[in-house]
Image (cartoon, rainbow, N blue to C red):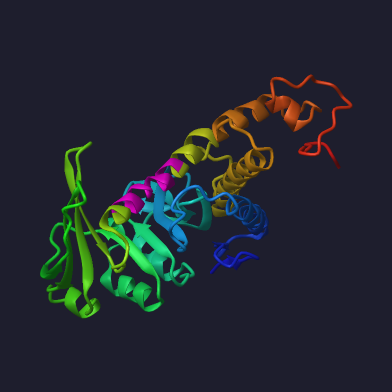
């Protein structure tokens, strides 16, 4: 169901795609491998953790059902979903799977290649205790939110007086008729007080060693995947498509992902301070100018034809 590259945790799905779709999926795969290797050398967050950190989520791209009859979603509405596993440290996607809108998010847990000791952060839409128990059985960790109707029994409580925003940190067992069978072992339950938004969040995890505030912080960083979806949709035009076939839609999405990763690679290789959006905008208005990239992005450089730099990429160096 997927492609594995030189970096084992990269897994990009290309099932049911035609030749064109597979070509662009492979291109994205190669770029992602390179981006992960570049950004892995510059880890600025969670240096105290040896675990790989992932955020899993999906975004829905609305389509007109009459034009895209294969993209079933609602009775009178079409859509595709882009299921994504994002490396939290680098904000680079490592798994992407494109389905029709009817496919439930939790099914994607069956498709990802689980990495032992990795931490997978998910929202409550992925709470399926059979699948979560399988994740635990593969020596991986999960952090998710509890549903409101979850039935549990407290077994132990940890002292949380040193943590300002933690109300409790408990070891519990599931007491629901089905959930107790699907997840028969103990699970950790943490209540976090979000003072900024005046809300209370209850987290579930099988990691009993991390401090409760770190668990809350990791879940907060799950929003990086929402920023990735927002960036892709707003700046790379995947809300409207040039073709109506499955392959046309998937190809356009793969191209958008490739552009995102390529800009991220350029930003890292040239050590740029500009945002990805700024770099993309500069490229869009200089696409056919035969000018070195350093000169385009650096206002202090003079636009001269014989400009040369050891830290330089060229658009026209064929």
Q: Quadrant of residue 308?
A: top right
User: Farthest residue toward the front?
Assistant: 162
Left or right of residue 295, residue 266 in this image: left
| Secondary structure mainly formed by the magenta segment | helix
User: In terms of depth relative to the viewer, which is nearer, 191 or 69?
Assistant: 191
Q: Is residue 313 above or below residue 290?
A: below
**Residue 205 magenta-drawn?**
no
Q: Residue at x 20, y 63 (%)?
A: 189
Q: Position of residue 136 (x, y in %)?
A: 35, 74
Q: Position of residue 86 (x, y in %)?
A: 47, 54
Q: Which residues are magenta?
A: 216-227
Left or right of residue 304, residue 224 in this image: left
Q: Can you see residue 103?
A: no
Q: Report the number of numbered marks.
A: 0
Left or right of residue 8, residue 184 in this image: left
Q: Can you see residue 293?
A: yes
Q: Is residue 269 above or below residue 112?
A: above
User: In terms of depth relative to the viewer, which is nearer, 136 or 273?
Assistant: 273
Q: Position of residue 262 (x, y in %)?
A: 64, 44
Q: Residue at x 67, y 24 (%)?
A: 285
Q: Is residue 283 above or below residue 133?
A: above
Left or right of residue 293, residue 316 in this image: right
User: In terms of depth relative to the viewer, which is nearer, 244 or 204?
Assistant: 204
Q: Residue at x 41, y 48 (%)?
A: 59
The quarter of the picture where the C terminus appears is: top right
**Residue 226 magenta-drawn?**
yes
């Amino acid at each position: 169901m997927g492609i594995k590259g030189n970096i084992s945790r990269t897994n990009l799905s290309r099932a049911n795609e035609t030749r064109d779709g597979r070509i662009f999926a492979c291109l994205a795969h190669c770029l992602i491998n390179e981006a992960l290797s570049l950004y892995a050398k510059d880890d600025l967050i969670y240096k105290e953790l040896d675990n790989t950190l992932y955020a899993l989520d999906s975004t829905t791209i609305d389509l007109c059902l009459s034009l895209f009859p294969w993209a079933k979603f609602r009775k009178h509405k079409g859509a595709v979903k882009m299921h994504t596993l994002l490396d939290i440290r680098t904000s680079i996607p490592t798994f992407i799977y494109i389905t029709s809108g009817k496919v439930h998010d939790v099914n994607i847990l069956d498709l990802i290649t689980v990495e032992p000791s990795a931490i997978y952060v998910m929202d409550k839409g992925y709470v399926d205790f059979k699948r979560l128990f399988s994740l635990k059985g593969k020596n991986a960790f999960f952090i998710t939110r509890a549903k409101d109707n979850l039935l549990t029994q407290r077994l132990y409580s940890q002292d949380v007086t040193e943590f300002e925003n933690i109300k409790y940190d408990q070891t519990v067992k599931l007491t629901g008729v089905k959930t107790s069978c699907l997840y028969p072992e103990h699970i950790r339950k943490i209540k976090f007080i979000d003072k900024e938004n005046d809300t209370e969040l209850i987290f579930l995890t099988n990691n009993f060693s991390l401090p409760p505030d770190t668990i809350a912080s990791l879940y907060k960083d799950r929003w990086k995947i929402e920023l990735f979806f927002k960036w892709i949709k707003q700046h790379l035009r995947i809300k409207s498509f040039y073709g109506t076939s499955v392959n046309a839609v998937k190809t356009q999405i793969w191209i958008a992902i490739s552009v995102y990763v390529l800009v991220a690679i350029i930003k890292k290789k040239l050590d740029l301070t500009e945002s990805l959006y700024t770099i993309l905008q500069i490229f869009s208005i200089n696409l056919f100018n035969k000018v070195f990239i350093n000169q385009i992005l650096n206002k202090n450089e003079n636009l001269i034809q014989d400009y040369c730099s050891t830290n330089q990429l060229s658009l026209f160096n064929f």
